[in-house]
Amino acid sequence: MGNTKIQINKTNASRLSEVDFANINFGKVFSDHMFMADFENGEWKNFEILPFQNLEFNPAFNSLHYGQSVFEGMKAHLDADGNVVLFRPLDNFARLNRSCERLCMATIDPQIMLDGLSELVKIDKEWIPKTEDGALYIRPFIFATDEFIGVAPSETYKMVIFTCPVNKYYDAAVKVKVEDHYSRAAKGGVGFAKAAGNYAASLLPAKKAAEEGYDQLIWTDATEHKYIEESGTMNLMTIIDGKIVTPPAGETILGGITRDAVLTIANDLGYKVEERPLSVDEVIEAQKAGKLEDMFGTGTAVTITHISGFGRNGIDYELPPVSERKISTHLKNELEAIKRNQNHSHKEWLVIVK
Ligand code: COI
């Protein structure tokens, strides 16, 4: 544990007893406390844990106008001894800083965030669901707070971490549409960052796809709409003829921490993995030849979510039933066990908060 001096002000009106843990809408239930800090005069200060509450803001906050706002998504579970287990938190904080750098925002020492988060999850430990699919979803974010509507990097920022008890993000496998007009990311852009604006830009295309009966999109490259990039807010993986094939993370594809964990576990378990450009045509050909065994998304919120089928140009392509998807189900079970400290592999990914 680090040395961050954190002022702690606990609530005397916990909302815990109001929560029905079996029926939680993702992202709508917030734990009792949050961690906050301010960036002013070139340094992070005012580290505090306080009751979850509304924040005051000035209408000229430049994050509201020009989008200097980045976030992360992480999860915590309880292990068999009742300790809080954080999964790869330093990887998330490193990515948060990469997002800050790209958006020209102040970065923050990952140890400060880890100290704040560790203290926060200790205080709100009772909020961690004990249900099979449950987790404490952790939302760290940083936004610009200069009261100035000139277009310039803010000189002040606020960092907040709050948490939400959650169950599954999607209740069932999702049907996706190959997007061939809108783009999520372009070379030289901000696709690799978890910039709030990336998610805003995805909403209209996703809404249009929903009107056509699809749950989400498959994003393709911005130049030719030929190569698969991501799916909705998830990294995308396929299993073609026994091999896990997924596009490489990079400038336009978020370096997902779940993505990396799944590929690492797949390699450990001896599955064949190919990270290479994957065209929509190749996937359609594989489907037609009966070789497209699986398609699934990976992400913190979704862990592994199966894709039931996909559509392109009005034609729908079906995938095998989820009950036949042995490899991805194996990977999901391994990952979930590691995240709950039930498995002896990859202890280096875990931070156990005692
Ligand atoms: C996550 O998996 O944490 C995400 O970023 C998805 C989120 C936008 C709900």
Image (cartoon, grey):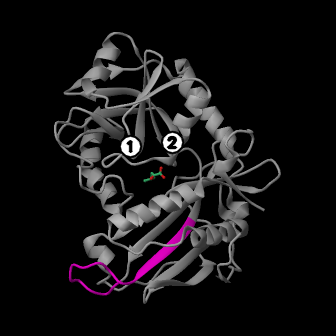
In the rendered image, residue 258 lying in the magenta stretch gets the answer no
State which quadrant residue 86 falls in: bottom right
Disc 1 crowd, CA 10 A, few/some/many (<14, 14-19, 20+)? some
Tell me which segment is drawn in magenta.
146-162
CA separation, marks 2 and 1? 9 Å
Asked if residue 329 can be seen in this view, the reply is yes
- Most distant residue in the bottom direction: 41
Q: Which mark is residue 260?
A: 2
Closer to the camera in the image, 50 or 37: 37
Mark 2: amino acid: Asp
Residue at x 21% of width, y 32% of height: 226
Label placed on residue 47: none
Q: Which quadrant of the figure has residue 177?
A: top left
**Does the beta carbon of the residue at mark 1 sit less than 8 Å from ligand 1?**
no
Disc number for residue 249 = 1
Task: Verify CB contact (< 8 Å) between mark 2 and mark 1.
Answer: yes
Please state the horizontal and vertical placement of residue 326, each as a whole percent of the image: 57, 21
User: In this picture, is 290 found above or below 107?
Assistant: above
Tell me residue 19's x, y (percent).
Answer: 65, 59
Quarter-wise, where is residue 136 in the image? bottom right
Q: How many marks?
A: 2
What crowding class fits label 2: few (fewer than 14 Cα within 10 Å), some (14-19), or many (20 or more)? Answer: some
Rendered location of residue 116, percent (x, y): 62, 72
Residue 1 is left or right of residue 111, and the answer is right
Residue 152 within the segment the image draws in magenta: yes
Quadrant location of the N terminus in the rendered image: bottom right
Query: Considering the numbered disc 1 on the image, is that residue within a helix, a strand or a loop?
Result: loop
> Is 13 situated left or right of 223 in this image?
right
